[in-house]
Amino acid sequence: MGNSYAGQLKTTRFEEVLHNSIEASLRSNNLVPRPIFSQLYLEAEQQLSSLEAGSRADNEEEEEEEEEEGSESSSPVSYQMKPPPEGCCTTDGFCQAGKDLRLISISNEHIEVPSGFLLVGAKSPNLPDHLLVCAVDKRFLPDDNGRNALLGFSGNCVGCGKKGFCYFTEFSNHINLKLTTQPKKQKHLKYYLVRNAQGALTKGSVICWKGAEFRGRQSSSSTCSSTLFQLPESSGLSGSTSSEPLPAANPSAPSGTQQTAAAIDHIPSTAAFSSAVYNGKESPKQHLVKNNLSALTRPSVLGTLTNSGPPKKRHKGWSPESPSSTETWNLQLNPQAPNRIKNDGGSLSSLPHSALVGPASSPMVGSGEPVSVPDNLLKICKAKPVIFKGHGNFPYLCGNINDVIVSSLLYTCYRNSQSLSRAYEQYGASTIQPISEEMQLLLTVYYLVQLASDQVPLIEDLEQIFMRSWRESHLSEIRQYQQAIPQTFPQVPSQIAPVTSAQLPWLAGLAASSCNDSVHIIECSYSLAEGLSEMFKLLIEGKLIKTNYVVIICASRNRAIDSCIVITGKYQARVLSESMLTPLDYQKEVNYQLVTGKVETLGSFFSTLCPEGDIDLLLEKFYQENQGHISSSLSASVNKPTALNGTGAAVCTSYEIERHQIRPFQLAVAQKLLSHICSIADSSTQNLDLGSFEKIDFLICVPPSEVTYQQTLFHLWHSGILLELGLEKEHLTKQRVEQYVMKLDAEAQIKFKVFLQNSMQNPHTLFVLIHDHAHWDLMSAMHSLYPQTELSTGLVDRLLNCREVKEAPNIVTLHVTSFPYALQTQHTHISPYNEIHWPSSYSNGVDLYHENKKYFGLSEFIESTLSGHSIPLLRYDSSFEAMVMALGKRFPRLHSAVIRTFVLIQHYSAAMMAVCGLSQMKNYTSVETLEITQNLINSSRQCPSGHGLMVVLRIPCTPLAAVAYERLYNVRERLALEDNFEIILGNPNSGITIGKHFVEQLKVWQKIEDVDWRPQTYLELEGLPCILIFSGMDPQGESLPRSLRYCDLRLINSSALVRTTLEQELGLAAYFVSSEIHTEKAVVNDVLESDPEKLSSTDNEDEEIATEGSTSEKRSPMKRERSRSHDSASSSLSSKASSKTLRSSLLTAGDTVKSPHQVLSNSAEETTNNYERQKQKVDKGAQTTISKHLPPVTEQLDTKQNIKSAQISITSSSSSPFSSSSSSSAPTHNSFILQTSQCSMTKASKQPPIVFLPKLVYDIITSTDSSGLPKSSSLLPYHSVMWASSFRPLMSKMMTCTEQSLYYRQWTVPKPIHMDYNNRNEGRMDTFHPRRLLLSGPPQIGKTGAYLQFLSILSRMLIRLTEVDVYDEEEININIKEESDQYYHQPGDMWPDLETFKKMPFDYTIHDPKYEDASLICSKLQTINSEDRSMNRRQEDMYTRRQTTRMRLSKYAAYNTYHHCEQCHQYMGFNPRYQLYESTLHAFAFSYSMLGEEIQLHFIIPKSKEHHFVFSQPGRQLESMRLPLVTDKSEDYIKSPTFTPTTGRHEHGLFNLYHAMDGASHLHVLVVKEYEMAIYKKYWPNHIMLVLPSIFNSAGVGAAHFLIKELSYHNLELERNRQEELGIKPQDIWPFIVISDDSCVMWNAVEVDCSGDRKSDYTWTERNVSLKQILQHIEATPNVTHYALIGMRKWSSKTNSAEIKEPFSCCHVHDFIMLNVDLTQNVQYNQNRFTCDDVDFNLRVHSAGLLICRFNHFSVMKKQIAVGGQRSFHIKSKVSDTPVSISPAQYICAPDSKHTFLAAPAQLLLEKYLQYHSHRFFPLSLKNYSHPVLSVDCYLNLGPQIAVCYVSSRPHSLNISSSGLTFSGLLLYLCDSFVVASFLKKFHFLKGATLCVICQDRNSLRQTVVRLELEDEWQFRLRDEFQTANAKEDRPLFFLTGRHI
């Protein structure tokens, strides 16, 4: 070890080995050192083998630093350091001379380095973050290959300059390393130091001691695609680095440990060797390795490589003959350099998708001695053992590491289960500890023990076991924490005593003792290495043949346990190792095996199985022998139906391809989608403004499957949606339809660009982007896994998640999928509120949607396996599985997909041959495959038109599918079946290709005449007998026809256990069955697919097992389960069943048939099968039975005993291989046979298909947890997501789709490769995209139809949003209007002439159609036929809906709160970024003598509207509302303030006048009741509110009008006073206000053209105009202040020329009026009124001599609003809250009676009573229009059959001349002091006329009678007094009635 020969030896290979040998012998305790020459040559040989096998290289790296000593497998050698000299420096980082050696301190200092020396960095255990600078002779350092370093040491101290250190021990003391172990240069000299560009000394590459690691600078030469961790950001090396930061402290390793992965942990296939995935030794790229050694001189490495050099002293038992006990040392990686991957053939499997939960760099640190993997392990064991790292440290493996697979999946599971989830942190993690390592391991053993021999362990199962165990053990603590607040560190003892590490091996052994050695426990006292060595030894010796799992436990030391689990079961190891392949690697591996011809061994093996010789030879021989015979018989049978068609015989009528029709379910889903869209639009976030869109456009994105693309086009074409949306014209071409569907392939971007451009150019079109089959490609565009292979990968992310789509306000994205789980993660873009799930058909046993079809999906298929009275629709094939398992053991190097495919092809080939007459081939197929093939071949013969069944054969791997197609195609040709059924290769990237003969058949069936027609979707193959080989790694949304009978999924990749994958494979079989047929009966009645036990007696079990047909019975070594026929071999037809049934039916044929169903069901599908089986019976001497009973059968065929023709064919022509129902054996009954035998396709469409699964998948699908949830549902939902925590609750069967979604949203996170990975934000809500929806529903249930229907109803709704229902009624009482030839104005006059207008008479008659049921107002003696009014007013007319018409909203419409557009945002006061507009509340008081008190109103004034008001300066008190001047003129200003009284219409009232006013400035005040103030303020934050006093909360519209007018007059006075001080005359202040209803929606103007020759000639047009234009026009009227009221017409489509010939009328005005508050100062609205208050007010204004002008050229449209307004008053009983309908007759009662009081205002009861029952008060007035009721000072509606005459008692008022009128009644309503006795005596009444006096109370009633001297002319009786049905506190009104004397 000394330095005496330093520098004297030449650095030759020989000398280096000599030195190594000497050093090894010095260190070794063994007396026999390894011979130098054998070492030399063995190493040379090893170097070559390392390149070939990709498994070995040298590693003489020393152990890790001191921190790691604790984790080393052997105890460290104790080392006593020499005490430092007295007085010297002992500070870390300084030498003993006190000079600083730290790199950080002296990096810029000049350091003299002698020639031949290099500066290197040494690591001190006490300064882990620093390097100490040393100068070392480079001869003692290794070269680039890690070799040729001389033994010993020579170095200098760069601090004090001391030179000549010859021993590293001495040098380490000098630089104060302070070691506790023997100093070694290999361990402490770590890095070369180099100068950077600035001249500073920096850390360089790692010193590569003995090949353990190559220089960091070489890392860039290695390019590898890390398929394991799927980190596509690394085209090269960083793929192996962790995607998530590693935990700071690893629980099982000390905190300074360099966390590196073992070599075998992860060596993915590289780009250079992409085709070699598993079998590196047989790589076709061998020559690359050998020829290009220069390129691979320094391959990068991940983890450690082994060295077969001699061990150290403390390792005993090493001998030159046992290279397996070589040693590895821990690797010291450069922390900054990425882990490297070795390129030698890329021969090891990578981990599964589910392994990605852990960090990429495995924290399992190899330590201690290495374990050598024995040679020929794969050959001996017939499987590669899979080693799962468990707890603690895992030793390095060396030797034949190609034959083992190491995974950290279990380690990750353990680690995750120890980290408490956030959900449980509330319970105090300090007291409730996670599950212990010992308990984890023990539970794992328990789990493995209970697994059956054909089951494979699942990580999900383990996680749930840990979770359950943890919850149970901590239940009391959790409960305690839930009940009380936790104190600081409360010590709660756990109920269960923890398992100690000493007990663990014993307990594990005890658990494993009961499992028949399926689980073997190995206990090590020293390290895992010895356990692994023992395990390998037992494997080689064949002692673990029965063992599936070996658990190795090292628990001897007083520290954490080490453990690992080795999967040694051949089946389990194969499944697990294959599950570690990514889909791409899986395809590469299979492709490689096909290309290199490895599968040929399988073919040769199959040929040895068949005793008659090779199958191909048999086929050829058969073909030669039967060529002529078969072709003729086939053509006869195939062509016969066509001939029959010609002769008019039976034709199958069951054929129909379903066209587009909407089912109730689809409509319901479409409406749910629509309601979600509406809720997005209605939310205050302003994310979708539906009101701004005029039409719909859309784009449907589908996966790049040609069939799916064509299928979507087909649906789109037949739905008619393009024509309905107006996107296309009548003559639709396919090219046009293609614009709306986009395949997500390389050309998608061009089409998508056009879509985006359209969306930008058409802001008023709503674009719906539909992403169908949305789970298909969720790859992140940033992390595209295979950039070099698939352009389409990550396309969804690139297109649908692009910024333009996210930000476009007019694009809504709808994701549609059957498997939404991957879109429901913690980072999803889709809000849970925007998810729409397909509704359940039943709720509490009630059928919600009556459909004529029943859907069969996954749950129904699973259900069929549970029910004991029908045949399971899900099955597995035990004989197939047994053969696959046997072959898997025989050919361990072949992928099981290859084996399974070849076995299944073999089975199908043999079955076809067996059906064609080669009965000996039955032994070489399974019963299931035989059943499928028989039914397929015979199906077309049973139908007169040749309809048949479809069999789907699912082969995910495309190369294998091509092989299968070729093979089956050849077999079919040889058997001359090419016209019997078609074989179709379904490749996602290409269309459908089928033979010409079958195309012609389809054209005949579908009545297609197009010469060039070819089927483009699988749906168009309806009725075609065919095998569809369905390839592609995943189905991409292709639908299958109803003729599908068998779905053969035996070849699906059963190792990729992900929920989405499994469910989408089973989704292929999802099916609609006609619900009229009872499915189970239909299934049972079909003999061939039924359970033999149900049809035959079970008295002869032995006969069944001995039957030849039941091949699976013979082969299957295990006993069959007879109780539940899950195994389809037992449930399909065996010879016993068929022959017994046939025999019994034949024997009973002459008598009454006992079970017609059974015989009937024995259709010709089974003919051949029955023939074969019957032939066996014939051979055994049963001929006599059959022949004896044949005559009755044939005789009775024409009777009504429904015997099928199958019996004839049995004995017909035994020579013919095809005995079918159309064979020539019974020509006389041929047509009858065709009619009675049911078409197979018809039967198929009435039953769900039968699905065959791999056994592994079958077990997962059919096994359920305690809640009944299938196991498949609790699997990881998708390969690109992972569980957020192992500590997650179990899913439950009771979970709804919404609850499942919330579960996944909480417990799954996307991996970096997922497109949602980066969608993270601190504020959770921000991550949801507001215009994104998700529609999920079971596969094939009709989602396409639903979303197309959604587009349709969305379009209709948008059109409906731009339309409005307006009242469209003709004016009433036109015939009463005096027909005068006099016209006061010309038709073209723009404004009325004041003087002319004064001459116009007032028209008392009401013409507004809303008053059709109001009393007519008489203006003079009118002769109206009594029939006229009654004819017009039938009683029921009062209740009929008023006539409306639908109008398109113009740009000048008024809107409700649902309208949001860009221009309105500021006007409405909504801005999502800011708070709602601030408002201030102001009181405004004024006194009014009539009310006898001061009125206090409140204004709510937004800040933005304060400029309309005047405030006092010091106190900001509201003084007045600003009014303009009469002389003001402005184009952008409306002078009149607008008041809109409203109640109950905060959402629907049309208060948004922004567009109506055309943006002009205006003052708009909403007049609301006090109790509604808050809700109106919420919806209209930027509107001024006038809040009525609370006493008016129950008042009607009269009160609002009254207060508006009084307030306005008071304000006018205030403004006159204010502005008078400014020198403005009072009469110059603008006196008008506008009072508008809250339902005025649009305004129209008539434009008159008087350019004709004569003055009277004119033409007119009506158009929509803005309210601004109308108001400004009216405000500009000459002498406008002389008019008291100005109004306009109610719009009607029936307006005629006569109505507008006179441009102005003096008549009633309604709905929208301009009121002159100055002129009408003394005319008030009646504040008590609820109805007709405007008519009442008009009459008062006119009687006061004021002018009322109606502009007939203007009209207002009123929207029909179904809520609020007068409807908001409900009259109900005051006593009970139960809504009882109360008739108007009950609204009044006798005073002091016990009548039920009503909770309604007295005035409302009065008005309603008079409207409906006034004839009780005025019997003479009924229909007596020439003798009206005299109404003084008021107008009350007495109903349409009574006329009234209004007179005013005011002096100087204008009243009609009543001299010639005789009245039939007198109505005195709350009359005031102006009404005097003398006034009433002027009027004449009929004898018997009636009087009604109405007063506030009984006292005033009597006073009124006395004051008006009524008793002089009127007779009163006590019983004629009434009151409204109010309680005393509600102040009822009192009536007194009397008769005229």
Image (tube, rainbow, N blue to C red):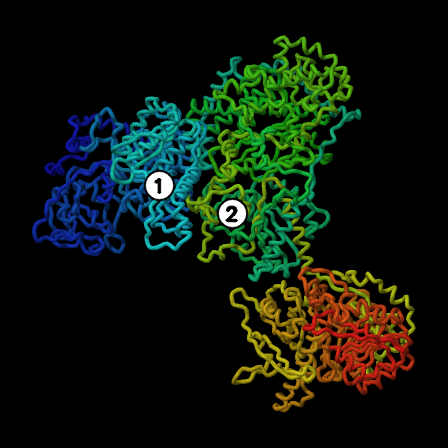
Q: Residue at x 59, y 52 (%)?
A: 755
State which quarter of the image contains the C terminus. bottom right
Amino acid type at image mark 2: Leu
Q: Nearer the viewer, residue 722 or 469?
A: 469
Residue 1386 is at least partly visible in this image: no
Position above or below: 1827 against 869: below
Residue 399 locus on image (x, y percent): 30, 29
Residue 176 locus on image (x, y percent): 15, 49
Q: Which residue is mark 1?
A: 496
Q: Earlier in the sequence, mark 1 or mark 2?
A: 1
Q: Nearer the viewer, residue 787 or 1785?
A: 1785
Name the mark on residue 1090. Answer: none
Amino acid type at image mark 1: Ile
* Apparent side of residue 1653 relative to residue 1836 in the rendered image (left or right): right
Q: Which residue is mark 2?
A: 823
State which quarter of the image contains the N terminus. top left
1 vs 2, front mark? 1
How many other residues sit within 10 Å of disc 1, few (<14), some (14-19) or many (≥20)? Answer: few
Question: Which image quadrant for residue 1400?
Answer: bottom right
Q: Residue at x 57, y 22 (%)?
A: 927
